[in-house]
């Protein structure tokens, strides 16, 4: 129980439990919800998962580092509206427009990061302010030039491939998501940055004392979160053929929900992208299943709340056991850096 | 035959008519075997009984749209159809997901009130390609699809501009409260309004903001505008809800007198407001025509065996202007 590997096993059990719950829910819906177990519905869910998942990858990094990014929905909205303005309004080619939009979103993330890491304002406050401010900018850029329904669509065929195209029957946006997920996973598991990130979230002081530039790590997570949210916004704009202003409203809650259900701790230092993938799938499957069953909107919302609460309660139980173990041993706070325990750099992040 | 009967007497006229009528009857009877051969045997008539209809509405927290949802179900029940009404919560992704669910469930046709004329287009295309006809209800989409039933939005914008110009004598400051900007209704009403305003050089738009088709937002947005605008002569709320909200804000600010409030739709509260003098005019239609026509069109499409990827028709219901002068003569909606 006291050994990090034991707590690691406990977490693993929890995430397997989540996976089992996801599979059980899927099987249940396949039997009860008409059309759930169809190829078409599978593809729909994968496309939805991609858009939520790309954002959730960035959010997971931020949360592992002990931060939170509430502005992802607004960045998604901004990226969608910018894409719409550039591709539809100004007829930019996608090879010019998409990099521009991604650069703008990354810049927004960078500003978030600077305010958190350099100006030392709490992440919750910075990104809450960002949520409103970025939404305001996005809405002020929103199309005012459309005078008939017929010319409201983004129609550049190359741009539309991002959200609607397939390669060998696999949706392109799903491939993009897998790419981002793979890159994020590699970053967390195979690089020194990943190691530092868990350390920063787990025990900031100890990490600082061991000579790691905590601010730089934090700054990087918010910047990457901005990039991910922007990429998600571009893909969504391509899927919807427009930059929809309300598409980002409340998206941050689904994203944070996915990360939390996936086992990351809002206290930082804990979380995996595999968990986030399962958490995001949980939210998508639950929503789609309820939609197919014809569950009224308010009950859908209620059920989503219950699921998130259950996940957090489980998380709380796991945390408490960890805390108790700490109190008993009066040891240093090493439990939270345990995901890195098997890495050679482990010794360096211990105080 | 008419000419020849004039030269004969009345009796001849009668005789002629009788013979003509008999001949006509014979012709019809002679033709009747052909018509019945063309028509399918009775047992093979397409039926509306038991058909499944998916309805995706903009939101259910708008009084008029709530009524439309209820009447879609009522009218559908009359045809023996099962109508499932979904609350789109003014969200493109939500509506897209609801459309996809209906496509997966293979409903017979879909009724869509799109919250975004562009954003719902891919979902509409998907439904039509899957052989499910889509009828858009009052909010059109850019994608070509089977049917649209709604108000003549552009005409509404024109009518409001003319109505305001008449009440102000062609001179004054106008505040434009836009709805959800991406909706077909907003795009077309605003375009019609702006076009028509060009005829009145004395009328100027001094403020133009969105209040998302919402009464509370209309109130809040106009409250703020009033603080910055010393002289406002008229307000066009692109739907009634916003106009009603804005009028309330003007009462609270003590500036109701001297401002004309116009809306578009024709919901009950607006017409009552015109009677009571709290608002000044509306471009309206008989709102119940919309769910009725939608369900009739659906029933017709189904019995005509129309199955997606076709353009059956666009029905734009022409609006009429209502002011205090004629409000007692128009149809009162249930909400």
Image (tube, coloured by chain):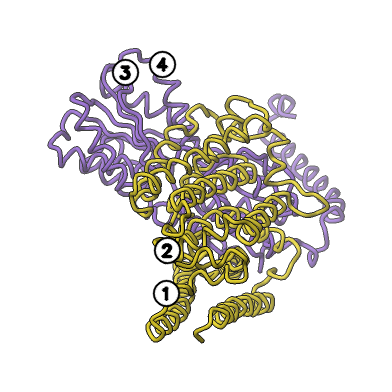
Q: Decide: few, some or many residues near mark 4? Use Cα within 10 Å; few <14, some 14-19, many ≥20.
A: few
**Where the N terminus of chain B falls, by quadrant?**
top right
Chain letter for the purple part: B
Label 1, on which residue?
Answer: A332
B31 in relation to B154, above or below? below
Q: Secondary structure at mark 3?
A: strand
The chain containing the residue under callout 3 comes to B
Of the two numbered discs 1 and 2 on the same chain, state the one appearing first in sequence.
2
Note the chain letter of the yellow one. Answer: A
CA separation, marks 1 and 2? 10 Å
**In this rendering, is residue A80 above or below B85?**
above
Residue at the spot of label 2: A206
Q: Secondary structure at mark 4?
A: loop
Q: Position of residue B152 (x, y in %)?
A: 50, 35
Q: Are marks 3 and 1 on the same chain?
A: no
Which residue shows up at 64% across the image and 26% down it?
A92
- Mark 3 → mark 4, Cα distance in angstroms: 8 Å
Instruction: Give the residue drawn at x 59%, y 48%.
Output: A232
Are the residues under badges 4 and 2 in a single subunit?
Answer: no
Residue denoted by label 3 = B203
Q: Nearer the viewer, mark 4 or mark 1?
A: 1
Q: Which residue is mark 4?
A: B198
Do the residues under discs 1 and 2 have CB atoms within 8 angstroms? yes
Name the quarter where the C terminus of chain B is drawn. bottom left
Q: Please, which chain is the residue tagged with disc 2 on?
A: A
- The answer to whether residue A100 is above or below residue A26 is above
């Amino acid at each position: 129980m006291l050994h990090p590997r034991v707590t690691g096993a406990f977490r693993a059990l929890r995430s397997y439990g989540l996976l089992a719950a996801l599979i059980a829910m899927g099987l249940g819906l396949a039997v009860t919800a008409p059309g759930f177990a169809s190829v078409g519905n599978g593809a729909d869910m994968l496309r939805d998962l991609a858009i939520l998942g790309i954002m959730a990858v960035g959010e997971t990094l931020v949360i592992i580092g002990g931060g939170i990014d509430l502005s992802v929905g607004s960045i998604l909205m901004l990226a969608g509206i910018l894409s719409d303005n550039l591709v539809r309004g100004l007829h930019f080619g996608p090879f010019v427009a998409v990099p521009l939009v991604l650069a703008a979103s990354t810049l927004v993330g960078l500003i978030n990061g600077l305010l958190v890491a350099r100006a030392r304002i709490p992440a919750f406050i910075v990104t809450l302010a960002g949520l409103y401010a970025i939404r305001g900018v996005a809405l002020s850029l929103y199309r005012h030039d459309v005078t008939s329904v017929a010319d409201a669509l983004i129609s550049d065929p190359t741009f539309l491939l991002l959200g609607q195209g397939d390669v060998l029957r696999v949706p392109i946006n799903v491939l993009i998501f897998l790419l981002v997920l793979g890159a994020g996973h590699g970053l967390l598991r195979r690089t020194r940055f990943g190691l530092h990130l868990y350390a920063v979230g787990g025990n900031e002081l100890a990490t600082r004392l061991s000579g790691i530039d905590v601010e730089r790590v934090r700054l990087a997570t918010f910047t990457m979160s901005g990039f991910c949210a922007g990429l998600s916004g571009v893909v969504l704009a391509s899927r919807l053929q427009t930059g929809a202003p309300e598409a980002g409203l409340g998206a941050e809650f689904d994203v944070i929900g996915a990360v939390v259900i996936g086992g990351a701790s809002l206290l930082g230092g804990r979380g995996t992208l595999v968990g986030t993938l399962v958490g995001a799938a949980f939210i998508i499957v639950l929503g789609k299943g309820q939609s197919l069953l014809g569950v009224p909107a308010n009950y859908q919302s209620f059920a989503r709340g219950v699921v998130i609460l259950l996940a957090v309660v489980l998380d709380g139980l796991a945390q408490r056991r960890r805390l108790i173990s700490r109190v008993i041993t009066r040891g240093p706070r090493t439990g939270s850096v345990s995901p890195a325990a098997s890495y050679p750099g482990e010794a360096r992040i211990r105080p | 035959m008419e000419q020849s009967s004039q030269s004969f007497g009345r009796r001849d006229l009668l005789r002629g008519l009788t013979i003509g009528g008999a001949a006509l009857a014979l012709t019809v009877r002679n033709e009747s075997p052909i018509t019945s051969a063309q028509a399918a045997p009775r047992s093979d008539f397409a039926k509306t009984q038991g058909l499944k209809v998916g309805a995706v509405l903009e939101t259910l927290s708008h009084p008029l749209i709530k009524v439309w949802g209820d009447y879609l179900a009522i009218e559908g029940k009359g045809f023996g159809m099962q109508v499932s009404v979904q609350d789109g919560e003014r969200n493109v992704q939500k509506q897209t997901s609801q459309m996809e669910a209906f496509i997966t469930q293979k409903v017979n046709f879909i009724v869509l009130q799109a919250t975004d004329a562009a954003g719902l287009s891919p979902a509409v295309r998907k439904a039509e390609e899957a052989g499910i006809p889509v009828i858009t209800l009052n909010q059109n989409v850019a994608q070509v699809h089977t049917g649209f039933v709604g108000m003549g939005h552009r005409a509404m914008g024109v009518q409001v501009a003319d109505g305001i110009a008449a009440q102000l004598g062609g001179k004054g400051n106008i505040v434009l409260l836009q709805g959800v900007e991406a909706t077909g209704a907003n795009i077309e009403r605003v375009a019609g309004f702006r076009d028509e305003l060009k005829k009145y050089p004395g009328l100027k738009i001094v403020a133009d903001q969105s209040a998302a088709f919402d009464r509370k937002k209309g109130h809040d947005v106009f409250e703020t505008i009033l603080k910055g605008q010393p002289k406002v002569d008229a307000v066009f709320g692109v739907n009634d809800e916003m106009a009603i909200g804005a009028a309330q804000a003007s009462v609270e600010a003590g500036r109701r007198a001297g401002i004309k409030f116009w809306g578009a739709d024709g919901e009950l509260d607006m017409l009552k407001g015109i009677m009571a003098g709290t608002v000044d005019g509306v471009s309206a239609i008989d709102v119940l025509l919309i769910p009725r026509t939608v369900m009739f069109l659906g029933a017709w499409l189904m019995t005509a065996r129309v199955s997606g990827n076709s353009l059956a028709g666009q029905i734009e219901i022409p609006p009429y202007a209502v002011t205090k002068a004629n409000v007692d003569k128009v149809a009162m909606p249930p909400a």
